[in-house]
Image (cartoon, rainbow, N blue to C red):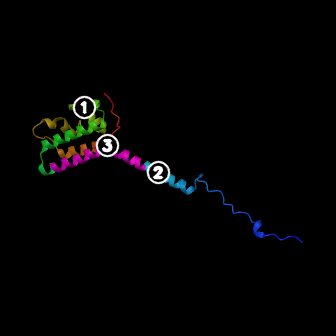
Amino acid sequence: MPTVSDPLQELRDVHMPDPISWWPLAWGWWMVAGFLIMVVGLALWAWVYRQRTQSRRAALAQLGQVKQRYATQANDHWAIVQLSHLVRRYALATFPRSKVAGLSGKAWLQFLDRTGQTNQFSHGPGQLLGIGPFQPQGSGSLADLIPVIERWIKNVHRGSKVSSE
């Protein structure tokens, strides 16, 4: 007669499966990684854009202050001097100093026309920037000059090509 053995003796120990590997990643983790890369890239682009347009925003804010003060005081000479300084500072902040600093008179107005792709400085209301600051009384319409300057500030930006003459 066969001997009956204990059936518990024939059982084997419990074997755990191999641990789950972290590689390759599941598709959900790839989506999270892609989303994070896009967010970081977008934030970096926004930061660079903000840095590049900082001088433009400051110039437009100062132009707004000049317009506001001119509306209350109506001092033509003061406004022309302020606008002339504003345009000069913005040009120095935007273009190489060697291209801007030595310009005056007609050459300055032609530079503004060339960089703004207009003719409003040499042949329009922008002529006030060439002669207005040096005259005791403003002679010309600031109502026409301010939009020309505002358009120039908005159209000219860092990295613009300046042809040397």
Toward which corner of the image does residue 159 lie, by quadrant?
top left
First in sequence: mark 1 vs mark 3: 1
First in sequence: mark 2 vs mark 3: 2
The spot of residue 29 in percent (x, y) is 54, 55
Q: Residue at x 30, y 45 (%)?
A: 54
Q: Which residue is mark 2?
A: 38
Which secondary structure type mostly characterizes the magenta part of the structure?
Answer: helix
Frontmost of labels 1 and 3 is 1
Tell me where the magenta segment starts and ends, as one range. Answer: 42-69
Q: Which residue is mark 3?
A: 155
Real-space Cα separation, disc 2 to disc 3, in angstroms: 29 Å
The spot of residue 64 in percent (x, y) is 22, 49
Q: Amino acid at mark 2?
A: Met
Real-space Cα separation, disc 1 to disc 3, in angstroms: 20 Å
> Relative to the observer, which residue lies in front, 41 or 163?
41
- Image quarter hosting the C terminus: top left
| As drawn, 3 above or below 153 | below
Q: Which residue is mark 1?
A: 101
